[in-house]
Image: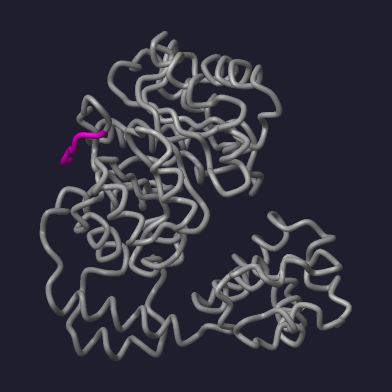
Amino acid sequence: MNYRKLGNPGEQVSILGFGLMRLPVVEGEHGKIDFEKAKEMFDFALANGINYFDTAYPYHKGMSEGFLREALGDRRKQVFIADKLPCWAVKENADFDRLLQEQLLRLGTDYIDFYLLHALNAKSWPIMKELGVLEWLEKQKEKGLIRHIGFSFHDKLKVFKEIIRSYNWEFCQIQYNYMDTEFQAGEAGLKYAAKRGIDVIVMEPLKGGLLAKEPPDDVKKAVKELGIVNGNVNLGLRWVWEQPEVKILLSGMNNMEQMKENIAIAGKNEIPLTKEEHHYLQVLKNTFQERLMIGCTECNYCRACPQKVAIPIIFRFYNTACIYEAPKWGQSMYSLFLREENRADKCIQCGHCETRCPQDLPIMETLVKADKYLRGI
């Protein structure tokens, strides 16, 4: 395992972090972690050099932090724990202390090494600032309850830059992979943070596993011609590590096979991608992009829908599921992360959205298609 310095002063952390969000579960129930299988993975990770474990308050319906406590046992000093303040659960200043104390109890520890404001965006960031979260974080660091201060992010580049400029952060966490170079913070955000001396952790390096799938039929010929044998997981992870601004990447491994594969690749991360491998990834990216069902840029002009249909989010799920031939993924996201009152079937075809779309997209027609696809009918 290779290591890089993270935070200020720098801690020697493994370049591969174990994200405890997609652990094996019992009977498909996300809140029921299969402790035996997950513990086996945890022990293997620790034995093979992984020392950075990332959890969060809501992961596995609140059970991830407790799993980490039980799996870790008396080996606390061997690892770095990353945990996150659930910003959406904060209604008043007193909630900061309440939530942190609850997390420390769940984790069974006196301190958290890397503490993040979870999923900051244009809505939550102003609220956090107004409630005094930055001053509170500094006080917790002085007390020794947290050791390094950062944030994770899901929004547009403009918002990311504003957050970066607002505080002397030690690190940040963004979604990044060879398909998402212009999504959310993207490449521009990655370089912006690094230029300002802020360490960057990458999440979703394989886009939640979508980039780990077998190449689609229409690119298998290109794969054969280029002689690519390393596989999409290998190339995807090495592509992220090849970015000089990236300190570590998090992988939400959910079985031992993935764990072993990722660790093996991490040991070879310094081997640069060949010209042919870069070309193959570009071919793959181009092929995926050609499958885009609707060219929504998520400008949000249509969010003023009188029926409160979440048009940009629906199109994001629809596009992603179609691009990666993952209908079950799309159906799951549609069901789990979108309220019924915001789904596409609530559209009454009033045309309000289309009069405001700067791309002149056929929104009403596509919402009908998206709804059928995302409901599996």
**How many labels sit on residues?**
0
Q: Quadrant of residue 32?
A: top right
Q: Is residue 242 left or right of residue 291?
A: left
Question: Quick check: 271 above or below 281?
Answer: above
Q: Is residue 208 magenta?
A: no
* 284 left or right of 334 in image: left
The secondary structure that most of the magenta stretch takes on is: strand
227 is higher (above) or lower (below) than 81: below
| 26 w.r.t. 158: above or below | above
Residue 221: horizontal and vertical position, in percent?
Answer: 30, 91
Q: Residue at x 71, y 79 (%)?
A: 356
Residue drawn at the location 16% of the way across and 79% of the way down: 276
Q: Quadrant of the C terminus?
A: bottom right
Percent across and percent down for residue 194 are 26, 47
Magenta-drawn segment? 1-6
Q: Compare residues 186 and 126 and report the one nearer the observer.
A: 126
Q: Is residue 11 left or right of residue 98?
A: left
State the quadrant of the N terminus.
top left
- Identify the residue at image location x=26%, y=84%: 223
| Residue 50 location (% of width, % of height) | 27, 35
Residue 70 position within the rendered picture, expressed as x and y whole percent measured from the top left: 48, 21
Determine which quarter of the picture holds residue 96: top right
Q: Does the magenta portion include 2?
A: yes
Q: Quadrant of residue 321?
A: bottom right
Q: Vertically, is 376 above or below 308?
A: below
